[in-house]
Amino acid sequence: MAIEPPTPAPTPARAPVPLGEGGEGLGSPSVSASSAFQSVPSYLALHATGELARRADAAWELLKGCTVCPQNCPRDRTRGLTGACHSGTEVIVGSWNIHRREEPPISGTRGAGTIFFGGCQARCTYCQNFWLSQMGHGIRVDCERLATMMLSLQKKGVHNIDLVTPTHFVPQILKALVIAADRGLRIPLVYNCAGYEHLHTLRLLDGVVDIYLPDAKYASNVEALRTSKMHHYVEYNRATLQEMYRQVGGLVVDEDGIAVRGLIIRHLVMPNGHAGTREVLTWIAEHLGSDIGLSVMDQYFPAYKAHNDPDLSRRLTWTEYREALDIVEDLPFENLFLQEDLTELDTTDAI
Ligand code: SF4
């Protein structure tokens, strides 16, 4: 029997709270006009017409000379070769379980049904889950087993299937979804990714994914390449966010505050301005609707190889996070998820 590796570090590490809770006057997400019947996931319609299966087949073709993601590795994964993500056709799963510490509209009251995938298209030197993303841990499963995981999570009563680091397994996820939908999967998908997608892959998810939860990590291609090994991250990230917004629009929640549709962007504030927070958030405000969800995270710590990087070898200070909040307050976002407990941050500004 396979031994499950340790549970990956949750992202975000501390559940963010919506700004404005307690009546501070900020906006709130659109509330879906009705009940659970309107939160039927979009993929069911595509499944009924056979389009979901066609999308899965089209995605599988991308594995040959893999162009699933912008790394464009010239490897035929269907013949056992692997690219930068160290993945072939088998799916690598680190864990699958209920996760209660995502943003409130994702975790809700019953939790998100999180599936953490192993391997990664990126090589972040500060990755908190490096044993899973970089070291090859996780169990290897086929699409049938992945479908079973989705169904077992639904059985536990979760609000959604929260696919974490899913990009390099889009073809397998689509095939698994066909199987799972056949067998009764009826909860929406959350696509929880680094925000580094190919548009041709993303378009295969149009009408399949209801809730996008991408990162906007950097404002600088130089820093993205140096610390995450992602080429042209800024251009790909911006195109990714725009396409996701085109597909699902702003954040929509049901009467219980649970996300049924929409885009929530995450930005991790990093030490020494490494993430380019002002530029990232300003671009989002200027190019996407104020109705998106925005999660500004403070939980950076120097994991993995970050101790060797003078810029990244310490935690965030409370002043740095406060500066990020000041930037956010000048922008028109309606649905903010912030980490207001600054006591866990480093109170020493000069290190
Ligand atoms: S999914 Fe993996 S193999 Fe394919 S292009 Fe991306 S990193 Fe390379």
Image (cartoon, rainbow, N blue to C red):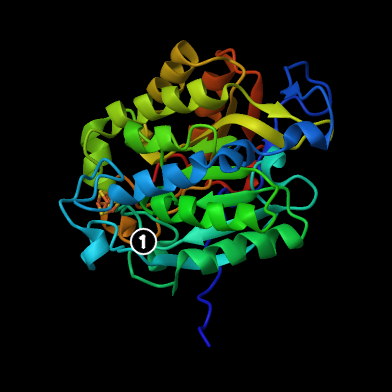
Lateral position of residue 282 relative to residue 162, left or right: left
- Determine if residue 280 is in view: yes
**Residue positioned 83% across, 22% down in the render:** 23
**Residue positioned 47% across, 50% down in the render:** 174
- Determine if residue 197 is in view: no
Lateral position of residue 310 relative to residue 316, left or right: left
SS category of the residue bearing label 1: loop
Question: Disc 1 beta carbon < 8 A from ligand 1?
Answer: yes
Front-most of 119 and 222? 119
Residue 327, percent from left and from top:
51, 20
Residue 315, percent from left and from top:
45, 49
Front-most of 299 and 176? 176
Residue 326 vs 54, above or below: the answer is: above
Residue 181 vs 320, above or below: the answer is: below
Residue 289, percent from left and from top:
55, 14
Front-most of 61 and 234? 61
Residue denoted by label 1: 119
Lateral position of residue 322 relative to residue 167, left or right: right
Occupied quadrant, residue 263: top right
**Residue positioned 66% across, 61% down in the render:** 151
Residue 242, percent from left and from top:
43, 22
As drawn, which residue projects farthest toward the front?
49
Residue 251 vs 223, above or below: the answer is: above
**Residue positioned 38% across, 67% down in the render:** 90
